[in-house]
Amino acid sequence: MLPATFNQLETTELAKFLIGKSLFRKIEETTYCGRIVETEAYLPSGDSACHAAAKRTRRNEVMFSSGGVAYVYAIHAKHCFNVVSESEGLGSAVLIRAAEPTFGIEEMKLNRKTDSIHNLLSGPGKLCQAMKIDISLNGMHLTKRNGVWIEDNGSKVDASRIKITNRIGVTSAEELPLRFVLANSEFASGPKYMR
DNA sequence: CCCCAGATTGTCT
DNA sequence: GACAATCTGGGGA
């Protein structure tokens, strides 16, 4: 499991820290797993693209929790999965955008209605559909092997292998270089986006 | 209620 | 590369 202190990292540090970690999801005796290859940081201040930037609402409430819980929201009729960062009351999170499928691959293919391993977890909405992540997981703690959690498999990703680009899809807000991608990963979102 | 933007994706040219 | 489908939450009346 991740150390209990991982949630105390600053948001951009957490976004980089999560690259290479394993995201697990267990539902109805099926376990899914993917190695995270792409994240984005949404900062607690000075970031108009962050859902928590304006004020606390029913949707963004869990973003103000102490870090280490799931923030799941729906957009464009799809779900997105985030890890809440920093300390209580700030309002920030890291969006998990893509992962390399490592376990439960056949079930993910069924959930995504595709045979392509490159089309299972290569986008925030795809990842949630493949792993059956929905709003019911909002607010769940990620440090217990229960429903959804994150583990460190021990293989450390060197900072030099993480590529930084602008965030994707942020339209009516300031664009910032807060997207982190495992360099040259064939499992990142795209292929039109830089890897 | 009603309106509409949006941290997306699939399809078509 | 362009564009429409899809739907929930937030804000205004």
Image: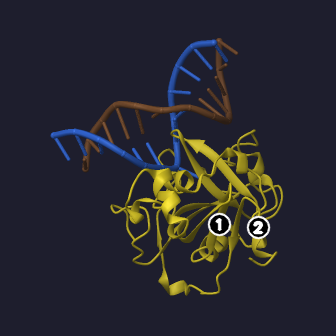
Chain colours: A yellow, B blue, C brown
Give the amino acid at mark 2.
Arg
Q: Is residue A167 in view from this perspective?
A: no
Q: Mark 2: which secondary structure?
A: loop
Do callouts 1 and 2 point to residues on the same chain? yes
* Residue shown at the point (62%, 75%) measured from the top left: A21
* Callout 1: chain: A
Identify the image quadrant of the N terminus of chain A: bottom right
**Depth order, front residue of A160/A157:** A157
What residue is disc 1 on? Answer: A24
Percent from the top left, x then y, of residue A4?
A: 82, 75
Percent from the top left, x then y, of residue A171?
A: 47, 47
Circles 1 and 2, Cβ within 8 Å, touching? The answer is yes
What residue is disc 2 on? Answer: A145
Percent from the top left, x then y, of residue A64?
A: 78, 53
Going by the image, does A91 lie left or right of A20? right
Give the amino acid at mark 1.
Phe
Q: Mark 1: which secondary structure?
A: strand
Among the 4 quarters of the image, the one containing residue A148: bottom right
Going by the image, does A192 lie left or right of A91? left
Going by the image, does A176 lie left or right of A28? left
**Depth order, front residue of A118/C13:** A118
**Disc 1: CA contacts within 10 A as few (<14), some (14-19) or many (>=20):** many
Percent from the top left, x then y, of residue B10?
A: 36, 45
Q: Earlier in the sequence, mark 1 or mark 2?
A: 1
* Residue shown at the point (69%, 57%) measured from the top left: A45
**Disc 2: CA contacts within 10 A as few (<14), some (14-19) or many (>=20):** some
Among the 4 quarters of the image, the one containing residue A42: bottom right
What is the CA distance from the residue labelled 1 to the residue labelled 2? 8 Å
Asked if A52 appears above or below A12 in the picture, the reply is above
